[in-house]
Amino acid sequence: MSIEVLNESGHDLDVKQLAALARFVMDRMRVHPLAELCIKAVDEPTIAELNEKWMEKEGPTDVLAFPMDELRPGLVNEEPEEGVLGDLVLCPDVAERQGATAGHGTEAELELLTVHGILHLLGYDHAEPEEHKVMFGLQGDLLAAWAAAESAAATDLR
């Protein structure tokens, strides 16, 4: 799996941790092991410009997902499709505010946005109530599994 994380945001981010999370989610979603993903963290003016250009929405947002080869989650006992998953653009400034409002901080918000963005790249959406229920349920499950894996890894290091 090729996961590139670029930090052009001016924030001090743990790019290795974001890459590990992305790998974890892609593995759980049975994305082909050679699939490619690029995650870029940018400042508010940059994401606002992208949001206006590509989404026709004004102002900064938290995450944008740009799917490439329209890969979908793999199925059990079926070979997943190889290709480029796409690009995620994160805005740590927005994540910092949202994380504070949610009471879980910037790092947890960036993790949530990374999972959310990967699900969008895999074709999930939340425009309709049923889609919202499915996507946010899966997002919660993936974040809980990641937290459990991280906790177990920290325990193993002791």
Image: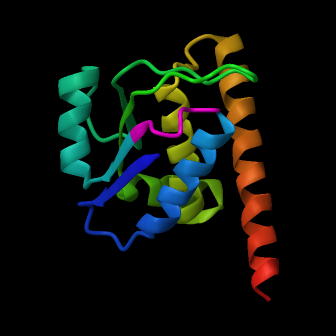
Colour basis: rainbow
Left or right of 7, for residue 77: right
Observer-nearest of 92 and 1: 1
Residue at 75% across / 31% down in the picture? 137
**Which part of the image, by quadrant, shows the C terminus?**
bottom right
**Residue 77, position as x, y percentages in the image:** 75, 22
**Residue 153, position as x, y percentages in the image:** 75, 72
Residue at 64% across / 62% down in the picture? 104
**Residue 130, position as x, y percentages in the image:** 71, 12
Observer-nearest of 22 and 107: 22
Query: Quarter-wise, where is residue 126 in the image?
Result: top right
Observer-nearest of 153 and 106: 153
Residue at 39% across / 41% down in the picture? 37
**Residue 1, position as x, y percentages in the image:** 47, 46
Q: Give the residue at the far bottom of this rendering.
A: 158
Q: Which residues are magenta?
A: 30-36
What secondary structure do most residues of the magenta stretch adopt? loop
Residue at 74% across / 59% down in the picture? 147
Residue 152 painted magenta: no
Left or right of 146, for residue 20: left
Query: Quarter-wise, where is residue 73 in the image?
Result: top right
Q: How many marks?
A: 0
Left or right of 144, for residue 99: left
In the picture shown, does residue 21 fall above or below 86?
Answer: below
